[in-house]
Amino acid sequence: IRVKARDVGTVQLTMFACAVVLSYFGSSVFAGAGQPAKSIKPIQLHPENGHYFLWRGKPTILITSGEHYGAVLNRAFNYKTYFKALSSHGFNLTRTFTGAYCEPVGAFKIKNNTLAPAKSKLICPWARSNTGGYANGGNKFDLTKWDPAYFERLRGFVAEASKRSVVVELVLFCPFYKDDMWELSPMNAANNVNGIGKMKRTEVYTLKYPKLLAVQDAMVRKIVEELKNFDNLYYEICNEPYFGGVTLEWQAHIADTIVKAEANFKAKHLIAQNIANKSKKVSNPNPNVSIFNFHYAKPPIAVAQNYGLNKVIGDDETGFAGSEPKAYRLEGWDFIIAGGGLYNNLDYSFTVGHEDGTAKIDAPGGGGPVFRKQLEILKDFINSFNFIRMKPNNSVIKAGIPNKS
Protein backbone atom coordinates (compact mmCIF):
# COMPACT_ATOMS: atom_id res chain seq x y z
CA ILE A 1 0.00 0.00 0.00
CA ARG A 2 1.50 3.32 -1.02
CA VAL A 3 0.16 6.81 -0.62
CA LYS A 4 1.68 10.21 -1.12
CA ALA A 5 3.82 11.54 1.71
CA ARG A 6 2.16 14.42 3.52
CA ASP A 7 3.61 16.92 5.95
CA VAL A 8 1.34 17.05 8.99
CA GLY A 9 3.33 19.32 11.25
CA THR A 10 4.92 17.20 13.94
CA VAL A 11 4.08 13.93 12.23
CA GLN A 12 5.11 13.27 8.62
CA LEU A 13 3.09 10.41 7.23
CA THR A 14 4.56 8.11 4.58
CA MET A 15 2.66 4.88 4.31
CA PHE A 16 4.31 1.79 2.87
CA ALA A 17 2.49 -0.31 5.47
CA CYS A 18 0.70 0.45 8.69
CA ALA A 19 3.90 -0.14 10.66
CA VAL A 20 5.46 2.91 8.99
CA VAL A 21 3.06 5.29 10.63
CA LEU A 22 1.77 3.41 13.66
CA SER A 23 3.94 1.44 16.08
CA TYR A 24 3.07 -1.05 18.76
CA PHE A 25 3.94 -0.19 22.32
CA GLY A 26 3.07 -3.66 23.62
CA SER A 27 0.82 -6.67 23.08
CA SER A 28 0.16 -8.51 19.83
CA VAL A 29 -2.27 -8.27 16.95
CA PHE A 30 -5.83 -9.34 17.85
CA ALA A 31 -5.02 -9.65 21.58
CA GLY A 32 -8.25 -9.52 23.51
CA ALA A 33 -10.35 -8.96 20.41
CA GLY A 34 -13.98 -9.99 20.57
CA GLN A 35 -14.23 -10.28 24.35
CA PRO A 36 -17.78 -9.47 25.47
CA ALA A 37 -18.40 -6.66 27.90
CA LYS A 38 -19.41 -7.61 31.43
CA SER A 39 -21.99 -4.84 31.34
CA ILE A 40 -23.33 -2.65 28.58
CA LYS A 41 -22.20 0.96 28.84
CA PRO A 42 -22.48 3.76 26.31
CA ILE A 43 -19.57 4.08 23.92
CA GLN A 44 -16.64 5.52 25.86
CA LEU A 45 -12.98 6.37 25.48
CA HIS A 46 -10.80 3.29 25.69
CA PRO A 47 -9.19 3.23 29.15
CA GLU A 48 -5.84 2.05 27.73
CA ASN A 49 -5.70 4.51 24.83
CA GLY A 50 -8.05 7.49 24.87
CA HIS A 51 -7.51 8.20 21.17
CA TYR A 52 -9.93 5.37 20.44
CA PHE A 53 -13.25 4.06 21.71
CA LEU A 54 -14.42 1.11 23.77
CA TRP A 55 -17.85 -0.09 22.69
CA ARG A 56 -19.68 -3.27 23.57
CA GLY A 57 -16.50 -4.72 24.99
CA LYS A 58 -14.35 -4.08 21.92
CA PRO A 59 -11.76 -1.48 20.93
CA THR A 60 -13.49 0.64 18.29
CA ILE A 61 -12.69 3.10 15.52
CA LEU A 62 -15.72 4.74 13.93
CA ILE A 63 -15.66 4.71 10.12
CA THR A 64 -18.58 5.47 7.83
CA SER A 65 -19.94 7.13 4.72
CA GLY A 66 -23.23 8.60 5.85
CA GLU A 67 -26.12 10.79 4.73
CA HIS A 68 -26.38 14.57 5.08
CA TYR A 69 -27.78 14.61 8.62
CA GLY A 70 -31.52 14.74 7.87
CA ALA A 71 -32.47 11.14 8.59
CA VAL A 72 -34.49 12.03 11.70
CA LEU A 73 -35.83 15.53 11.00
CA ASN A 74 -36.93 14.68 7.45
CA ARG A 75 -40.12 12.71 7.91
CA ALA A 76 -39.90 11.38 4.35
CA PHE A 77 -36.55 9.64 4.90
CA ASN A 78 -36.69 5.85 5.45
CA TYR A 79 -33.95 5.29 8.00
CA LYS A 80 -34.42 1.52 8.14
CA THR A 81 -33.36 1.17 4.51
CA TYR A 82 -30.46 3.53 5.20
CA PHE A 83 -29.14 1.52 8.13
CA LYS A 84 -29.43 -1.67 6.13
CA ALA A 85 -27.14 -0.09 3.54
CA LEU A 86 -24.61 1.09 6.14
CA SER A 87 -24.48 -2.26 7.87
CA SER A 88 -23.93 -4.07 4.56
CA HIS A 89 -20.51 -2.38 4.49
CA GLY A 90 -19.84 -2.90 8.19
CA PHE A 91 -19.89 0.84 8.85
CA ASN A 92 -20.52 1.81 12.45
CA LEU A 93 -21.35 5.54 12.58
CA THR A 94 -23.99 7.99 11.40
CA ARG A 95 -24.27 11.71 12.05
CA THR A 96 -27.67 13.38 12.35
CA PHE A 97 -29.22 16.71 13.36
CA THR A 98 -32.08 17.18 15.82
CA GLY A 99 -34.37 19.45 13.77
CA ALA A 100 -33.61 22.75 15.48
CA TYR A 101 -31.91 23.57 12.17
CA CYS A 102 -32.82 22.62 8.62
CA GLU A 103 -31.98 23.95 5.18
CA PRO A 104 -33.90 25.41 2.26
CA VAL A 105 -34.00 23.54 -1.01
CA GLY A 106 -30.87 24.33 -3.02
CA ALA A 107 -28.68 25.29 -0.07
CA PHE A 108 -24.96 24.82 -0.77
CA LYS A 109 -25.91 23.67 -4.30
CA ILE A 110 -27.06 20.32 -2.93
CA LYS A 111 -29.85 18.67 -4.89
CA ASN A 112 -32.02 16.12 -3.08
CA ASN A 113 -30.70 17.35 0.27
CA THR A 114 -31.96 15.28 3.20
CA LEU A 115 -31.52 18.36 5.42
CA ALA A 116 -34.02 20.25 3.25
CA PRO A 117 -37.40 18.61 3.93
CA ALA A 118 -40.24 19.13 1.49
CA LYS A 119 -43.15 21.28 2.64
CA SER A 120 -44.68 20.06 5.93
CA LYS A 121 -42.11 17.24 6.22
CA LEU A 122 -40.01 18.78 9.00
CA ILE A 123 -40.36 17.02 12.33
CA CYS A 124 -38.55 18.43 15.36
CA PRO A 125 -38.67 18.29 19.17
CA TRP A 126 -41.39 20.94 19.45
CA ALA A 127 -45.05 20.30 18.76
CA ARG A 128 -46.99 22.13 16.12
CA SER A 129 -49.56 24.63 17.38
CA ASN A 130 -53.05 25.29 16.04
CA THR A 131 -51.81 28.45 14.34
CA GLY A 132 -50.82 28.35 10.71
CA GLY A 133 -47.84 30.11 9.25
CA TYR A 134 -44.65 28.03 9.47
CA ALA A 135 -42.31 29.17 6.72
CA ASN A 136 -42.12 25.75 5.04
CA GLY A 137 -45.70 24.65 5.37
CA GLY A 138 -47.99 23.66 8.20
CA ASN A 139 -48.63 25.24 11.56
CA LYS A 140 -46.21 27.20 13.69
CA PHE A 141 -44.44 25.52 16.61
CA ASP A 142 -45.10 25.80 20.34
CA LEU A 143 -41.75 25.87 22.11
CA THR A 144 -43.37 24.90 25.42
CA LYS A 145 -44.69 21.58 24.14
CA TRP A 146 -42.98 18.44 22.86
CA ASP A 147 -43.96 16.45 19.81
CA PRO A 148 -44.45 12.80 20.86
CA ALA A 149 -44.15 11.68 17.24
CA TYR A 150 -40.71 13.26 17.00
CA PHE A 151 -39.37 11.47 20.05
CA GLU A 152 -40.88 8.21 18.88
CA ARG A 153 -39.03 8.68 15.59
CA LEU A 154 -35.80 9.71 17.34
CA ARG A 155 -35.87 6.67 19.64
CA GLY A 156 -36.75 4.44 16.71
CA PHE A 157 -33.82 5.83 14.75
CA VAL A 158 -31.30 5.20 17.52
CA ALA A 159 -32.81 1.76 18.20
CA GLU A 160 -32.52 0.76 14.54
CA ALA A 161 -28.94 2.01 14.52
CA SER A 162 -28.25 -0.08 17.61
CA LYS A 163 -29.68 -3.17 15.95
CA ARG A 164 -27.32 -2.59 13.02
CA SER A 165 -24.31 -1.93 15.30
CA VAL A 166 -24.15 1.73 14.32
CA VAL A 167 -23.24 4.57 16.69
CA VAL A 168 -25.20 7.82 16.41
CA GLU A 169 -23.48 11.19 16.60
CA LEU A 170 -26.44 13.38 17.51
CA VAL A 171 -25.68 17.01 16.69
CA LEU A 172 -27.85 19.20 18.89
CA PHE A 173 -27.52 22.55 17.12
CA CYS A 174 -26.13 24.17 13.98
CA PRO A 175 -25.39 27.82 13.14
CA PHE A 176 -27.52 29.61 10.60
CA TYR A 177 -25.14 30.36 7.76
CA LYS A 178 -27.62 32.57 5.91
CA ASP A 179 -30.85 34.37 6.69
CA ASP A 180 -32.96 31.91 4.70
CA MET A 181 -31.83 29.14 7.06
CA TRP A 182 -32.74 31.12 10.17
CA GLU A 183 -36.10 31.82 8.53
CA LEU A 184 -36.87 28.07 8.66
CA SER A 185 -35.97 27.46 12.30
CA PRO A 186 -38.68 26.82 14.90
CA MET A 187 -36.56 28.97 17.23
CA ASN A 188 -37.27 32.00 15.03
CA ALA A 189 -40.16 34.05 16.45
CA ALA A 190 -41.79 34.07 13.02
CA ASN A 191 -42.20 30.29 13.27
CA ASN A 192 -43.45 29.86 16.83
CA VAL A 193 -46.41 31.09 18.87
CA ASN A 194 -44.31 32.03 21.89
CA GLY A 195 -42.75 35.24 20.63
CA ILE A 196 -39.29 33.80 21.31
CA GLY A 197 -36.44 34.29 18.87
CA LYS A 198 -36.52 37.95 17.87
CA MET A 199 -32.81 38.32 17.32
CA LYS A 200 -30.33 38.18 14.47
CA ARG A 201 -29.26 34.73 13.34
CA THR A 202 -25.75 35.48 14.62
CA GLU A 203 -27.02 35.87 18.19
CA VAL A 204 -29.01 32.65 18.53
CA TYR A 205 -26.19 30.69 20.17
CA THR A 206 -25.10 33.14 22.82
CA LEU A 207 -26.02 33.71 26.46
CA LYS A 208 -27.68 37.05 25.69
CA TYR A 209 -31.31 35.91 25.50
CA PRO A 210 -32.50 34.01 28.60
CA LYS A 211 -35.86 32.92 27.17
CA LEU A 212 -34.31 31.36 24.07
CA LEU A 213 -31.54 29.82 26.15
CA ALA A 214 -34.16 28.23 28.40
CA VAL A 215 -35.81 26.70 25.32
CA GLN A 216 -32.47 25.32 24.15
CA ASP A 217 -31.65 23.93 27.60
CA ALA A 218 -35.05 22.28 27.86
CA MET A 219 -34.60 20.65 24.45
CA VAL A 220 -31.21 19.27 25.46
CA ARG A 221 -32.53 17.90 28.75
CA LYS A 222 -35.53 16.31 27.05
CA ILE A 223 -33.40 14.59 24.38
CA VAL A 224 -30.89 13.39 26.96
CA GLU A 225 -33.69 11.93 29.08
CA GLU A 226 -35.35 10.22 26.12
CA LEU A 227 -32.12 8.58 24.97
CA LYS A 228 -30.54 7.76 28.32
CA ASN A 229 -30.71 3.98 27.89
CA PHE A 230 -28.95 3.77 24.52
CA ASP A 231 -25.32 2.68 24.41
CA ASN A 232 -24.75 3.61 20.73
CA LEU A 233 -24.84 7.36 21.14
CA TYR A 234 -22.82 10.46 21.86
CA TYR A 235 -23.72 14.14 21.58
CA GLU A 236 -22.05 16.85 19.54
CA ILE A 237 -22.79 20.30 20.92
CA CYS A 238 -23.01 22.21 17.65
CA ASN A 239 -22.05 21.72 14.04
CA GLU A 240 -19.41 24.19 12.81
CA PRO A 241 -19.72 26.64 15.72
CA TYR A 242 -16.90 28.70 14.24
CA PHE A 243 -19.52 30.23 11.91
CA GLY A 244 -22.60 32.27 12.67
CA GLY A 245 -21.69 33.92 15.95
CA VAL A 246 -21.68 30.82 18.18
CA THR A 247 -19.80 31.66 21.37
CA LEU A 248 -17.49 29.42 23.35
CA GLU A 249 -19.38 30.37 26.50
CA TRP A 250 -22.62 29.08 24.99
CA GLN A 251 -20.95 25.84 23.91
CA ALA A 252 -19.60 25.32 27.42
CA HIS A 253 -23.07 26.01 28.80
CA ILE A 254 -24.68 23.36 26.56
CA ALA A 255 -22.00 20.82 27.50
CA ASP A 256 -22.66 21.57 31.16
CA THR A 257 -26.39 21.17 30.57
CA ILE A 258 -25.79 17.67 29.19
CA VAL A 259 -23.59 16.75 32.14
CA LYS A 260 -26.12 18.01 34.68
CA ALA A 261 -28.98 16.26 32.90
CA GLU A 262 -27.10 12.97 33.12
CA ALA A 263 -25.84 13.49 36.67
CA ASN A 264 -28.08 10.79 38.14
CA PHE A 265 -27.77 8.37 35.23
CA LYS A 266 -25.91 5.12 35.83
CA ALA A 267 -23.99 5.63 32.60
CA LYS A 268 -22.95 8.87 30.94
CA HIS A 269 -22.65 9.65 27.24
CA LEU A 270 -19.62 11.22 25.61
CA ILE A 271 -19.71 14.82 24.39
CA ALA A 272 -18.08 15.99 21.16
CA GLN A 273 -17.08 19.49 20.15
CA ASN A 274 -16.55 20.59 16.55
CA ILE A 275 -13.33 22.64 16.64
CA ALA A 276 -12.52 23.89 13.13
CA ASN A 277 -12.40 23.24 9.44
CA LYS A 278 -9.09 21.59 8.53
CA SER A 279 -7.01 22.06 11.70
CA LYS A 280 -6.51 23.99 14.91
CA LYS A 281 -4.65 23.33 18.14
CA VAL A 282 -7.01 23.03 21.09
CA SER A 283 -5.27 25.13 23.72
CA ASN A 284 -7.91 25.16 26.46
CA PRO A 285 -9.98 21.96 26.16
CA ASN A 286 -13.33 21.79 27.88
CA PRO A 287 -13.04 18.99 30.48
CA ASN A 288 -16.56 17.81 29.60
CA VAL A 289 -15.53 17.12 26.00
CA SER A 290 -14.06 13.75 25.01
CA ILE A 291 -14.19 13.96 21.19
CA PHE A 292 -12.69 16.82 19.22
CA ASN A 293 -14.07 16.89 15.69
CA PHE A 294 -12.76 18.62 12.59
CA HIS A 295 -14.12 19.01 9.07
CA TYR A 296 -12.18 18.60 5.81
CA ALA A 297 -9.17 17.56 7.91
CA LYS A 298 -6.69 16.99 5.10
CA PRO A 299 -3.82 16.69 5.54
CA PRO A 300 -4.49 15.38 9.07
CA ILE A 301 -2.54 18.08 10.88
CA ALA A 302 -5.30 18.25 13.51
CA VAL A 303 -4.35 14.80 14.80
CA ALA A 304 -0.71 15.73 15.31
CA GLN A 305 -1.60 19.09 16.85
CA ASN A 306 -3.95 17.57 19.41
CA TYR A 307 -2.60 14.09 20.02
CA GLY A 308 -1.39 15.16 23.46
CA LEU A 309 -4.98 15.63 24.63
CA ASN A 310 -5.29 11.83 24.79
CA LYS A 311 -8.83 12.11 23.46
CA VAL A 312 -10.49 11.01 20.23
CA ILE A 313 -9.73 13.28 17.28
CA GLY A 314 -12.37 12.98 14.56
CA ASP A 315 -12.89 14.01 10.94
CA ASP A 316 -16.68 13.98 10.80
CA GLU A 317 -17.38 15.83 7.56
CA THR A 318 -15.83 15.75 4.10
CA GLY A 319 -16.69 17.48 0.85
CA PHE A 320 -15.92 20.27 -1.61
CA ALA A 321 -13.28 18.18 -3.39
CA GLY A 322 -15.32 16.98 -6.35
CA SER A 323 -17.41 13.84 -6.61
CA GLU A 324 -14.72 11.29 -7.45
CA PRO A 325 -13.80 8.78 -4.71
CA LYS A 326 -10.04 9.41 -4.69
CA ALA A 327 -9.98 12.60 -2.61
CA TYR A 328 -12.22 11.20 0.12
CA ARG A 329 -10.53 7.80 0.08
CA LEU A 330 -7.15 9.46 0.67
CA GLU A 331 -8.61 11.74 3.33
CA GLY A 332 -9.90 8.74 5.24
CA TRP A 333 -6.68 6.74 4.98
CA ASP A 334 -4.50 9.70 5.93
CA PHE A 335 -6.65 10.61 8.92
CA ILE A 336 -7.03 7.13 10.41
CA ILE A 337 -3.38 6.19 9.82
CA ALA A 338 -2.36 9.45 11.51
CA GLY A 339 -4.06 8.25 14.68
CA GLY A 340 -7.57 9.62 14.25
CA GLY A 341 -10.38 7.68 15.86
CA LEU A 342 -13.35 8.71 13.74
CA TYR A 343 -13.95 9.27 10.02
CA ASN A 344 -17.31 10.21 8.51
CA ASN A 345 -17.45 10.76 4.77
CA LEU A 346 -20.43 12.88 3.77
CA ASP A 347 -22.27 10.71 1.25
CA TYR A 348 -24.75 12.47 -1.01
CA SER A 349 -25.96 9.26 -2.64
CA PHE A 350 -28.37 8.78 0.29
CA THR A 351 -31.54 10.72 -0.50
CA VAL A 352 -35.28 10.47 0.03
CA GLY A 353 -36.32 7.68 -2.31
CA HIS A 354 -32.76 6.36 -2.53
CA GLU A 355 -32.07 5.58 1.11
CA ASP A 356 -30.05 2.60 -0.12
CA GLY A 357 -27.37 5.03 -1.31
CA THR A 358 -27.84 4.66 -5.05
CA ALA A 359 -28.87 8.21 -6.01
CA LYS A 360 -26.91 10.15 -8.59
CA ILE A 361 -24.71 12.64 -6.77
CA ASP A 362 -25.41 16.27 -7.64
CA ALA A 363 -23.78 18.04 -4.72
CA PRO A 364 -20.37 19.42 -3.65
CA GLY A 365 -19.13 16.07 -2.36
CA GLY A 366 -18.81 12.37 -2.98
CA GLY A 367 -19.99 8.98 -1.84
CA GLY A 368 -21.89 6.21 -3.57
CA PRO A 369 -21.61 2.42 -3.77
CA VAL A 370 -18.15 2.35 -5.38
CA PHE A 371 -16.67 4.65 -2.77
CA ARG A 372 -18.25 2.73 0.09
CA LYS A 373 -16.72 -0.53 -1.12
CA GLN A 374 -13.34 1.21 -1.20
CA LEU A 375 -13.81 2.59 2.31
CA GLU A 376 -14.49 -0.93 3.55
CA ILE A 377 -10.84 -1.71 2.81
CA LEU A 378 -9.68 0.97 5.25
CA LYS A 379 -12.12 -0.29 7.88
CA ASP A 380 -10.97 -3.89 7.50
CA PHE A 381 -7.30 -2.93 7.37
CA ILE A 382 -7.16 -0.87 10.56
CA ASN A 383 -9.33 -3.40 12.40
CA SER A 384 -6.88 -6.17 11.53
CA PHE A 385 -4.47 -4.60 14.03
CA ASN A 386 -4.66 -4.27 17.77
CA PHE A 387 -4.71 -0.50 17.26
CA ILE A 388 -5.15 0.22 20.96
CA ARG A 389 -1.47 -0.72 21.33
CA MET A 390 -0.38 1.62 18.55
CA LYS A 391 0.65 5.24 18.22
CA PRO A 392 2.15 7.51 15.53
CA ASN A 393 5.88 6.97 15.07
CA ASN A 394 8.17 9.36 13.20
CA SER A 395 11.36 7.41 13.79
CA VAL A 396 10.74 4.84 11.07
CA ILE A 397 10.40 7.47 8.33
CA LYS A 398 13.65 7.82 6.40
CA ALA A 399 12.45 9.24 3.07
CA GLY A 400 9.42 9.87 0.89
CA ILE A 401 7.93 7.73 -1.84
CA PRO A 402 10.62 6.09 -4.04
CA ASN A 403 10.99 7.42 -7.58
CA LYS A 404 8.68 5.85 -10.18
CA SER A 405 6.65 4.13 -7.48
Image (tube, rainbow, N blue to C red):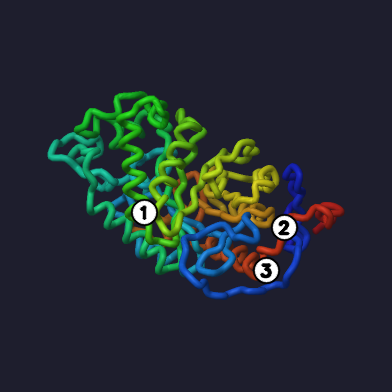
Residue at the outermost left position: 130
**Amino acid type shown at disc 1:** Ala
Q: How many marks?
A: 3
**Image height of 209 relative to 320, above or below:** above
Between disc 1 and disc 2, whose residue precedes? 1
Q: Amino acid at mark 3?
A: Phe
The residue beneath circle 3 is: 385
**Horizontal and vertical percent for residue 341?**
60, 56
> Which disc is residue 391 wearing?
2
Relative depth, front residue between 22 and 47: 47
Which one is in front in this view, the residue at disc 3 or the one at disc 2? Answer: 2
The numbered mark, 3 or 2, whose residue comes first in the sequence reads 3
Q: Position of residue 392 (x, y in %)?
A: 74, 55
Q: Which numbered disc, 3 or 1, marks the residue closer to the eye?
A: 3
Judging from the image, what secondary structure is the residue with disc 2 in?
strand
Callout 1 secondary element:
loop
Quarter of the image with the C terminus is bottom right
Q: Give the alpha-carbon distance from disc 3 to disc 1, as whole Å.
A: 33 Å
Task: Name the residue tied to disc 1.
Answer: 71
Q: Is residue 46 visible?
A: yes
Q: CA distance from mark 3 to mark 2?
A: 12 Å
Give how far apart the Cα atoms at labels 1 and 2 are. 35 Å
